Amino acid sequence: MAQASNAPAELPTEEELGRAGLKLAVEGHVARITISRPERRNAMTGRTWRTLAHIGHALPEDVRIVVLSGEGDTFSAGIDLQMFTPEGVDGEKSMVAGILEGTSTDQDVEDYVEELQQGFLWLRRPDLVTVAAVRGHAIGAGFQLALSCDIRILGDDAKFTMKEPALGLVPDLTGTKPLVDIVGVHRAIEICLTARRVEAAEARELGLAELVVPADELPGAVDDVVAALLATNPEAATATKALLQQAARNTLEEQAAAERRAQVGRLRALASALGAQQ
């Protein structure tokens, strides 16, 4: 019987990235992912999200920071609406063809959406800090991609819109929970069901942006944040992110216990480092 290979997964090739409308640059501890379909206002397809999941699975272990941005002055116009036509996009699977043909069961559709969600879920990994650098429109899936990141840095021209309900759909790419966690259920209902634009200044007031800067200063602001994140001990950063992620669902007593357990590991690591110096 053949044994499973322990070799690390390989990152997508340039050709695969190009077909998915993505660019990827990995430099040391930082991976930069750019949504690159400017002819479609950086609209995304199922292939985009499957390739994002591939990137997340295959990133080198020493990558600590992931920066997501859009090419040009738009983050992303959301899903490419041609995905809702029987023909789909460039031979890619249509979102509705199987339903129209009567060949897709409800479970088939759920499984397909679950596969696409993997392109968003990995951005929450405790061992990574993910940063969305947003210029211009972040609509629907683009808004949800930004919501999947730990930190959102906006140019002052940024605009968030949750467009799915206006199209007869629901936001299904893991964006509803972070939106409610950040702005509360009532404001989330208003944002989603009116499909209005949330511009950069309001996004900062609502907590949807950690920082808003002039659009031409966005790259420099992102680089400053990345440098500050890299200056933090990586193991402590991972442990702290994991603690913060569970805080909302824990009672005070549960969170205090989680802090104690995490600190035991950190103190042992510090003691080990001190012992090695003696």
Image (cartoon, rainbow, N blue to C red):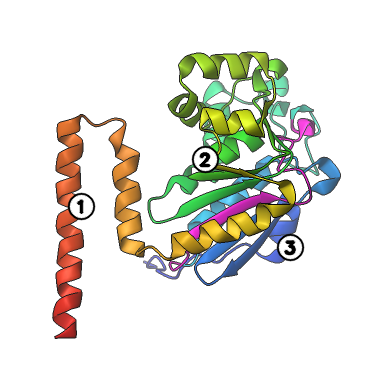
Q: Residue 160 has which mark? A: none
Q: Residue at x 20, y 67 (%)?
A: 269
Q: Secondary structure at mark 2?
A: loop
Queried whether the magenta region covers residue 80, the answer comes back as yes
Q: Secondary structure at mark 1?
A: helix
Q: What stretch of residues is rendered in magenta?
A: 61-83
The residue under label 1 is which amino acid type?
Ala
> Which quarter of the image is occupied by the C terminus?
bottom left
Q: Residue 148 has which mark? A: 2
The residue under label 2 is which amino acid type?
Ser
Q: Horizontally, is 233 left or right of 261 in the view?
A: right
Please say if the residues under marks 1 and 3 sit with CB atoms less than 8 Å apart: no
Residue 39, relative to residue 195: is it above or below? below
Are there few (<14), some (14-19), or many (20+) residues within 10 Å of tag 1?
Answer: some
**Where is mark 3, residue-wise?**
15
Are there few (<14), some (14-19), or many (20+) residues within 10 Å of tag 3?
Answer: few
The earlier-in-sequence mark between 1 and 2 is 2
Judged from this view, the residue extending furthest toward the right is 39
The number of numbered discs placed on residues in the rendered structure image is 3
